Image (cartoon, rainbow, N blue to C red):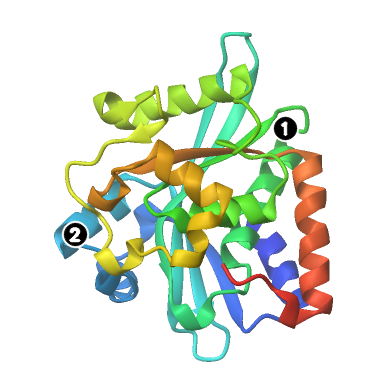
Amino acid sequence: MLEQRILDVYQLLSRSNTSAQFVKTSTLHEDEIAKLWRVFEEHHTITYEEFLARCREKCDMTALFRDALSGEIVGFMGVRHKDLTLKSGETISTLYFGHGFILQAYRGQQLIQRTVLALYLRCILKVPTRRVFIWSNALTVRPYLLTAKDLQEYYPHPVKAWPEDVREIRDRLGQHYYGDDFDSARGVVRKRSRYVNEHMLHIRPEKLHDPHVQLYLRLNPNYIRGDGLLTIQPATLKNLSFYMQLLLANHLTPRARSRR
């Protein structure tokens, strides 16, 4: 697959001690899902049976992250792809990233970003004229902060208003995937139970002054009971250039990597 070749080149250039592999979620055997569960279970509230159903039903593809030496799975990320035709008549592609977890020791290696970049490049190489939008359902403030620190254009934004087309995309995705549980006024998905353990929801006191954290808490005050905030990131050349500059700077000066 094209996206797998992109990931392989990325790993070679970055000299990472982790490898990434794309697989169709439907092809995962139950013993493989059990390995994902061992990474996931300590930090989430759902049962193994619920996790198994989510793996098989919620995502088209799964990115598996492995220790490059041992081959052990150290994280994973679920992916959904959906094309939408907007009211304007334009067809766009959307990529969802979620339903995953990375062990603490393997964070800071741009694993999620590598996955997003590989699939984005596949989309634009297949249909160069089609716009691509990345989205997620941020159950904690962490994924939203990750977006805000890595990109120039992202929504919701502490200062910038939602462009009409991006808001339409958010609302269409929210309604399609979450139905009546989606609150379009705030862009929030109401959850009937909490999905992540309480320790994952903790926000350090010094972070409360961050405008992104303040915006997250204002829009999603019920995050503590499990609600999620839909975030949208246009996959533009401006965003790609900004991220690649950060990546280069972090590669040249590893100690300067941001602590998110």
Q: Is residue 2 visible?
A: no
Q: CA distance from mark 2 to mark 1?
A: 38 Å
The reply, left or right, for residue 219 in relation to residue 91 is: left
192 or 116, which lies in front? 192
Which image quadrant is residue 255 in?
A: bottom right
Where in the figure is residue 74, as x and y percent of width and height? 45, 78
Residue in the picture at 56% in, 67% down:
260
Mark 1 crowdedness (10 Å alpha carbons): few <14, some 14-19, many ≥20 = few
Residue 18 visible to the viewer? yes
| Residue ranking furthest to the top | 88
Name the element at disc 2.
loop
Q: Is residue 209 above or below residue 70?
A: above
Q: Closest to the observer: 170 or 202?
A: 202
Please state the horizontal and vertical placement of residue 138, each as a whole percent of the image.
42, 48
Label 2: how many residues lie within 10 Å, few (<14), some (14-19) or many (20+)? Answer: some
Q: Residue type at mark 2: give it.
A: Ile
Q: Identify the residue under disc 2.
A: 46
- Assign the N terminus to one quadrant of the image: bottom right
Of callouts 2 and 1, the N-terminal one: 2
